[in-house]
Image (tube, helix red, strand yellow):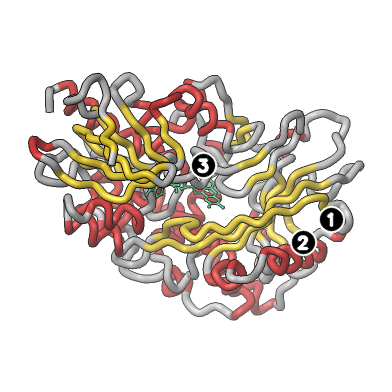
Amino acid sequence: MRTDKVGGASDPFDVVVIGGGLAGLAAAWRLRKQRVLLLESGDRLGGRLYSQREDGDDYWLNFGAHLFPAPGGVVDSMAKDVGLQTLPITGSMMGIAYKERILSSGPIESYPLRLPLPVREKIAFARAGVRLKRAVARYHQVLARRPGESEAELRQRSLAYLDDRTFSEFLGDLSPETASIFACAAHRATAEPASLSAGSGIGLFALVWGGAGSLIARNLVGGSSVLPEALGRQLGDRVRLGAEVRRIAPRAEGIQQVEYTIDGQSEIAEARHVIVAVPAPIAAPLVAPISRVAAESLSAITYGPFLSMAMRTNEVAAQPWDDVYALATPGRSFDMFTNHAQILRTSAERAPGGSLMVYAGGDGAARLMARPDEEIKQTFLADLHRLYPGTRGIVAEAKVHRWQLGNVYARPGRHRLQPALEGPLGESRNVHLAGDYFAELGSMETAAKTGDSAAQRVARALASGG
Ligand SMILES: Cc1cc2nc3c(=O)[nH]c(=O)nc-3n(C[C@H](O)[C@H](O)[C@H](O)COP(=O)(O)OP(=O)(O)OC[C@H]3O[C@@H](n4cnc5c(N)ncnc54)[C@H](O)[C@@H]3O)c2cc1C
């Protein structure tokens, strides 16, 4: 086994970051002037940000996260640091396709009246919608940051908000048709309404209805992977790909030994601080030797799957989905249809070709992802052709991606797990957690913010000689 050190035989790294998703990248980026090593088990950076673009192609295939937060946050600032700029999405983001009707414009309050539902259903749907709108307004009020409140305190309040009941219980009795519409929305959090806490169900709608300033309002031309790739290029040999961390072992004088495998070899990196930026179920066994309570909390955090299919299309004329960015599709094998070429449709002349994605979340995704790729493709394509018959014959390429840990979601009681995860862990107080699971619903900005906060804590400790 080889031991990695820098700057001489007795010199450990200032910090080892485990995981090269946005949380780990934000941490490594903040600490890039220190002696930092980022270990990523995969063959690329970005984690759940994943797009593919061929040289010279205007379009890119998207498999994971694609909606970027508004300017002013950590993701935006990292993008700017590497010369990238996200753009506001101009297409419709709150469309819904139910049975044969597609609604992608007009106030959402009018949807219950305009969807092909029996009158009784329209009334029940409208009532549930009004309750939800009021709850979202209250959510914004209650969770506005209070003067002097820390990130951790705000997080705790946010996680505790209506987490004594499920989203189903909050919605009340709904007919199967109306329930399927809300279930489709909950699948965006990879959960079923009966598992999701009421607070996170409401938070999900607050996010979707958040408008231009929200966490999900923008796109990166070229695809989401452009950002981690650019960060990776600048981080250079501070990043090691294909490096799977197996164990963190405390050593004398507060130094942590991070054991990992790379190219079939076992190696050790010694570090003054470790930032663990992998999903909670993977983080749990890694931090168990450092903090048993943190490991127990991490093991209790819930994730659901996403199953996505990215498609390259070869149409030569304008299409009915050109102005649509995202469409919820209840009652189909996928829950969401997204049009990744929409951001490029700026000139009067419509360029040929396009890029679409469909994805399913929750129980439906779990069932379908167990099937072979070809069956998944045929299932998704059959529903896509029913949704937009014009897609028949123009799908030149379709690729399936399975996300077993697609997104984190909060179950009732989630806030009780949080205190054990905050702050530095262990006797030496030099192991730190970061990841999207710090919030009730996973997002790029939460991931990046927690990585950045952990890095700032490390920078302060290093500066004070700790
Ligand atoms: C289909 C899909 C759509 C989404 N849409 C959006 C969206 O539009 N907007 C949005 O804000 N969010 C979206 N999300 C959520 C968003 O992608 C995540 O919240 C965020 O990217 C999580 O970042 P992370 O760094 O916490 O975790 P991850 O991205 O999961 O990164 C963890 C990294 O750790 C690595 N790793 C794991 N184990 C080890 C180990 N033992 N050693 C070393 N490395 C290891 C993994 O390979 C991975 O690269 C979406 C997610 C999916 C799957």
Towards the viewer: 152 or 380: 380
Kind of residue at disc 2: Leu
Q: Position of residue 465 (x, y in %)?
A: 12, 23
Residue 449 lies left or right of residue 370; in this view the side is: left
Q: Which element type, helix, strand or loop, lies under badge 1? A: helix
Determine whether label 1 and label 2 are within 8 Å by CB: yes
The answer to whether 351 is drawn above or below residue 407 in the figure is: above
Q: Residues within 10 Å of mark 3 (few under 14, many from 20)?
A: few
Q: Give me the residue at 8% from left, 35% from top.
A: 253
The answer to whether 128 is drawn above or below residue 293 in the figure is: below
- Would you say the beta carbon of the disc 3 residue lies within 8 angstroms of ligand 1? no
Residue where numbered disc 3 is placed = 43
Q: Give me the residue at 12% from left, 28% from top.
A: 466
- Sequence-first tag of 2 and 3: 3
Label 2, label 3: how many angstroms apart (C-alpha)? 31 Å
Residue where numbered disc 2 is placed = 384
Determine whether label 3 and label 1 are within 8 Å by CB: no
Q: Give me the residue at 66% from left, 32% from top.
A: 222
Instruction: Check residue 391 in the rendering and tell me which mark sits there, or answer none.
Output: 1
Label 1, label 2: how many angstroms apart (C-alpha)? 7 Å
Numbered disc in front, either 3 or 1? 3
- Sequence-first tag of 1 and 2: 2
Q: Which element type, helix, strand or loop, lies under badge 2? A: helix
Q: Which element type, helix, strand or loop, lies under badge 3? A: loop
